Image: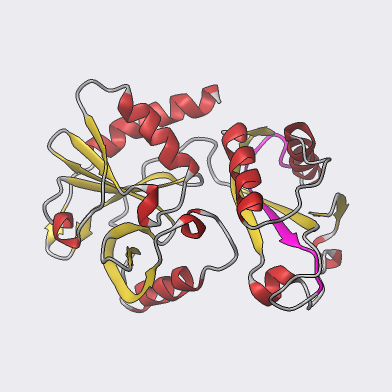
Amino acid sequence: MTNLNGNIVANTDASLSVSNRGYAYGDAVFETIRAINGKIMFWEDHYFRLMASMRIMRMEIPSSFSPEFVEQEIKDLLEANGLSDAPARVRFSVFRKEGGFYSPQTNDVGYVITAEELSSPFYLMNEDFYEVELFKDHYVNSGLLSTVKTNNKAVNVLGSIYAKENDYSNCLLLNENKSVIEALNGNLFLVKDKVIKTPPLTDGCLKGILRGKILEIVKKLPDYTLVEESISPFELQKADEMFITNVIVGIQPIHKYRKKEFGTAVAKELLTKLNVLARLS
């Protein structure tokens, strides 16, 4: 079942026009959300990021889009799919209504919500060997738009194809200044001695929900120093650990980059604290 503009319909009936602006121009934003037993994790963070994304894209936010309304729309869909007592992945997409070409005829929006079951209610540590490489064919431009989850994901798609063709688990993306900003599907963290480092939003990395939660956790740990600074590709092989974060997998440790192999001790420590934080959200 799918929620299409407030109506829960069978997936086969949830059709969008070929003139839909999300399809035609990538004129859409979305949130990927994790729900556990009908409870939406980090809901306030997701809601305000969605509203901020719509404002940046100059979309008209409907007066009905209160936190309570949007949350209930998601919960109704979870119930319709039999996922009220299960872990689930939810995608909430908002698109500008059709009309016009590059210049839209309206800033009014429509939305579609989908949900599917996840395998575990908790964040688990993936111990499978995980190797990454730089994706250098295309760059992400630093700036405000790169921090927003829009449908314009050509670099991520091409990077994913490159990773698959070359047997890498993931790729790391660069901005126009050749700084490493993130992975294809999440934010990047480096650990060197007792310093945990991640790129700043001004470099063009996504303003990830889990990125924010890891920052909260690390700031409370007296044994570690948190640094938000640009990361040079030359730093990667000097790190003790590297890991990727996103709201679905939690923390994904990187085991190898080129000739360097990495530990996972800090990632495991943070994952434990993240699961505690998730239960309290």
4 and 268: which one is in front? 4
Q: Quadrant of the N terminus?
A: bottom right
Question: Which residue shows up at 30% across the image and 35% down it?
Answer: 268
202 and 251: which one is in front? 202
Q: Describe the colour scheme in one phrase.
A: secondary structure
Q: Vertical placement of 245 versus 155: above or below?
A: above
Is residue 221 toward the left or the right of residue 93 in the image? left
Instruction: Look at the image and tell me whether residue 41 can be seen.
Output: no
Q: Residue 86: percent from the left, percent from the top?
A: 65, 38
Question: Which residue shows up at 81% across the image and 58% down it?
Answer: 108
Instruction: Look at the image and tell me whether residue 205 can be seen.
Output: yes
Residue 94 colored in magenta in the image: yes
Range covered by the magenta-colored residues: 83-99
Q: Residue 92: percent from the left, percent from the top?
A: 68, 51
Counting every numbered tag in the picture gives 0
Q: Quadrant of the C terminus?
A: top right
Q: Vertical placement of 248 versus 280: above or below?
A: below
Is residue 190 toward the left or the right of residue 93 in the image? left
- The quarter holding residue 79 reads top right
62 and 181: which one is in front? 62
Question: Which residue shows up at 23% across the image and 20% down it?
Answer: 222
Residue 213 colored in magenta in the image: no
Q: Residue 149: percent from the left, percent from the top?
A: 55, 56
Q: Residue 260: percent from the left, percent from the top?
A: 13, 58
